[in-house]
Amino acid sequence: MMLRDKRKLLFYVCLVFICGCSGGVKHYSRPHTDVKHIKSIAVLPFENYTTDGYADEKIGSITGIELLSRGIDVTEPGEVGRVLQEMRVSSLKALTPSDIQEIGEALKVDGIMGGSVSVYQISRGISVSYPEVSVYLTLYESATGKVLWSTWHTSGGPGFWTRHFGAEIATLGEVSRNVIKEAFDNLF
Amino acid sequence: MNMMKKCILTLMLFVVVIVSGCRSSAPVYHIREDIDFSYFKKVAVMPLDNLTPERAAADIVRQIVTSELLASGLVDVIVPGEVMTALNDLDIKNISSLNEKQIQAIGKSLQVEGLIIGAVEKYGETRIGNVSAPEATITLMMADTGSGNIVWSMTGTRGGADFMARHFGAKSETMSETVMVLIRGMVQTLKRQ
């Protein structure tokens, strides 16, 4: 009888923990479209909404490395810059589907990755400071200029052990790699 | 037995105190009841007004709204660059006070059924006593491009450190999580239709 009660208690404890867990990254994937045909991608310069002047370049670089590690061919950033300059693109916010098609054709890539960095900082919580990184990523199909996949994802915040026992906190670089990795886990 | 009763009473008192500190999380919003929302297949998210000192708040919130609308599967969202092109072509400078004709003209130009407009009223850390916590207040509206009327509007606010975070060191949300959960909740009200 006692053993049964203990099992019940264990079950409820597990249930509480599971309920407290997050449900993964929410994302959009264009219906009836397979991203498997995307073998090469050009990563556009990211928009930077943070106070760190280099956050966009850091996240852009991590994005390129993560794509390469997943077997996707990534165009050199210099080549992307040259094409944008030739096309006289002044603002990446104002890219239209025809611009995306044009960039894709010039760089001979299947997809164009754009995005922004919303947060890249050490934030101050109630009792501890912690790294926080938030990114917005969009994958366009070069052939049509349409959005194939998009997500807004955030990572960071102090964990249980950090808040209560002062355990070591991940660095901004580690959180950045984590946020990009988690975002791509539901794409490739 | 007496000890048992005392324990139950203490527990009940504790629960009452916690519940008294809670507030209703039910969102308050307006939605036109005579509108069939399945009609809205494609919408454009317009640049939002930024009423905060945070320089990029409106751009960040606009991207999360776009992402959440797409991820919800309710509607397709037009590429932001097309919105900029349409606004330039129509020579519309002031987005915070669009009139019916302008809403209809933008809808016609972008070939969308709805326009999402709104403002970011609060975006940042709020300090209460010795505790600071993230807080966001956002107003979103959807205008029907056929009639130029507002068919859905909602002001949502979220943030602050809750009871458990203040007293027991439970995890409090980051600024990004606060905004994301707030917008997700607002978009969910459209899903309920």
Image (cartoon, helix red, strand yellow):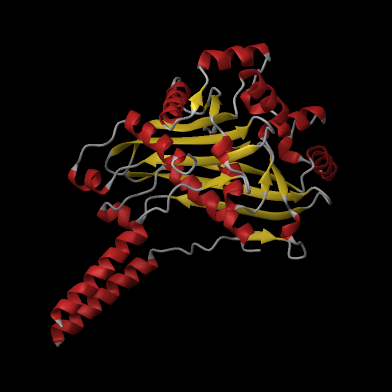
Question: Can residue A122 be seen in this snapshot?
Answer: no
Quarter of the image holding residue B60? top right
User: Where residue A83 sits in the image (x, y, percent)?
Assistant: 62, 14
| Residue at (59, 44) in percent of width and height | B65
In the picture, the quarter occupied by the N terminus of chain A is: bottom left
| Residue at (72, 34) in percent of width and height | B83
Total number of numbered discs in the rendering: 0
Question: Can residue B144 be seen in this snapshot?
Answer: yes
Looking at this view, name the residue that lies furthest to the bottom: B1
Left or right position of A34 against B2:
right
Please, is residue B159 above or below residue B49 in the view? below
| Residue at (83, 41) in percent of width and height | B108
User: Where residue B95 sits in the image (x, y, percent)?
Assistant: 72, 36
| Residue at (59, 60) in percent of width and height | B28
Left or right position of B84 against B119:
right
Left or right position of A44 against A168:
right
User: Where residue A183 sits in the image (x, y, percent)?
Assistant: 45, 40
